[in-house]
Amino acid sequence: MSTTIKAAEKPLGTQTSSTSSSSAMGKRERTKVENRQAILDAARLVFAELGYGETTVRDIIRRTGLASGTFYNYFKSKDEVFQAMMDASALRMRPRIRAERIRAASFEEFISASFRAYFDYLEQDEQMHRIIRRKSGSMRVRMDTPEVVAVFDELRLDIDRAISQDVLPKVDPEYLTAAFVGIAFEVGDRMQAREPFDSAAAAEFATKLFLGGVNALPRLEDSD
């Protein structure tokens, strides 16, 4: 009888152990996600308050309440934290910008709607552009992360589609993609360093430059 009871208890104990292990694994994964997000949320606040250049990893850790070692389980430096923030921003931005491109019925609409959606998004993320305004030195966003590369890939696919549908002229799609990205990133960077923040003016400038070259740009008034 004793042997029978033990035999019955063994599978039960094994099942309980397996369930507990699975539950513990799920909890650990949730904790990892929560800790990483806590670091990103804290970094946004500290970067906005102190500026990127003045912020230290210790400042970010203090705001999270996590141990120092926990921070380094997720990020090696504040630069990695900032890049993760930019990647998350790119992930949120992609569907909106692509939707504008897909709706375009002409070359001008394709270009102007894409620029406007991108610059509008930058303007709406007020905390991020406060961070960029206060950055010190030359801190450039990396162009080779998976999220940013995905933005480029989607743009190239949409350009190929638009060319095949005669929405865009039959020009070199690779160069066209590079030109579009270059103008968007550089004008966006300058726009975020200005007061007041004017996404409409930035979009108009970028669109006219892209479509008509320098001769199509609006002339500045003389400042006498």
Image (cartoon, grey):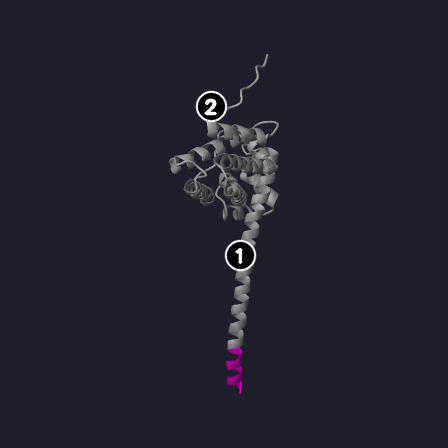
Q: What element carries label 1?
A: helix
Q: Nearer the viewer, residue 73 or 165?
A: 165
Q: Nearer the viewer, residue 45 or 183?
A: 183
Q: Is residue 213 above or below residue 104?
A: above
Q: Can residue 111 be seen in this view?
A: yes
**Mark 1 lies on residue:** 29
Predominant SS of the magenta segment: helix
**Mark 2 lies on residue:** 214
Provide residue 203's location: percent of width, then percent of height. Answer: 54, 31
Q: Residue furthest bottom?
A: 1
- Identify the amino acid type marked 2: Val
Mark 1 vs mark 2, foreground winner is 2
Q: What element carries label 2?
A: helix
Q: Is residue 24 above or below residue 47?
A: below
The residue carrying pointer 2 sits among few (fewer than 14), some (14 to 19) or many (20 or more) residues within 10 Å by Cα, namely few
Mark 1 to mark 2 CA distance (whole Å): 53 Å
Q: Does the magenta stretch include residue 139?
A: no
Quadrant where the C terminus lies? top right
Segment colored magenta: 1-10
Q: Which residue is drawn at 50% across and 84% down?
A: 3
Provide residue 110's location: percent of width, then percent of height. Answer: 50, 37
Q: Residue at x 57, y 51 (%)?
A: 34
Provide residue 193's location: percent of width, then percent of height. Answer: 56, 28
- Identify the amino acid type marked 1: Glu
- Of the numbered discs 1 and 2, the one sitting upstream in the chain is 1
Q: State the count of labels.
A: 2
The residue carrying pointer 1 sits among few (fewer than 14), some (14 to 19) or many (20 or more) residues within 10 Å by Cα, namely few
Q: Is residue 194 above or below residue 109?
A: above
Q: Which residue is drawn at 42% across and 40% down?
A: 163
